[in-house]
Image (cartoon, helix red, strand yellow):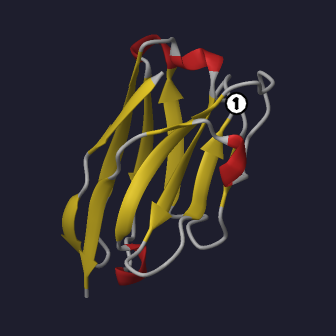
Amino acid sequence: VQLQASGGGSVQAGGSLRLSCAASGRTLNNYAMGWFRQAPGQEREFVTAISRSGGSTYYADSVKGRFTISRDNAKNTMYLQMNSLKPEDTAVYHCAAAGRSGWTSVVIATEDYQYWGQGTLVTVSS
């Protein structure tokens, strides 16, 4: 599966952005999905994940209550709605797909994701 992330941009603190991750090559419902981010000079970190069914989600504490992950398997697309953005959310955001997962399971570990998109830059200014 090939993944293409989009929707990044520059916003002021408190603003919102919606990221999309479009999949091609295989249908998205074969994969648990996740978003990760990498700020300059830092390691890639987990942001949020969603099960193949879309019914199970998991969030890093740093984004809980502000970000919402969702997916539309019919459109082969995953989304990340980001509200109340903070300067510390500035990073390149990557979407990822994990095979070999159960229908209702979320995948959190970076090493369990086999497919990665190229990333989209989110910049939040204070």
Q: 24 or 53, which lies in front?
A: 24
Which picture quadrant has residue 5?
top left
Going by the numbered disc 1, the residue's amino acid type is: Gly
Residue 124 rendering spot, x and y as whole percentages: 27, 75
Residue depicted at 25% across the width and 47% down the height: 7
Residue depicted at 57% across the width and 59% down the height: 47
The residue most toward the bottom is: 126
In the rendered image, the vertical position of residue 98 relative to residue 6, given as above or below: above
Residue depicted at 63% across the width and 24% down the height: 31
Residue 63 rendering spot, x and y as whole percentages: 56, 67
Residue 11 visible (yes or no): yes
In the rendered image, the vertical position of residue 9 relative to residue 124, given as above or below: above
Residue 82 visible (yes or no): no
Which picture quadrant has residue 38?
bottom left
Question: If the image is split into quadrants, where does the C terminus sit?
Answer: bottom left
Query: In this rendering, would 89 be left or right of 57?
Result: left
Residue 60 rendering spot, x and y as whole percentages: 65, 64
**What residue would you read off at disc 1?**
55
CA neighbours of label 1 inside 10 A, class few (<14), some (14 to 19), many (20+): few
Residue 95 rendering spot, x and y as whole percentages: 47, 44
Residue depicted at 49% across the width and 12% down the height: 26
Q: 114 or 87, which lies in front?
A: 114
Q: How many marks do you count on the picture?
A: 1
In the rendered image, the vertical position of residue 110 relative to residue 96, given as above or below: below
Q: Secondary structure at mark 1?
A: loop
Q: 1 or 95, which lies in front?
A: 1
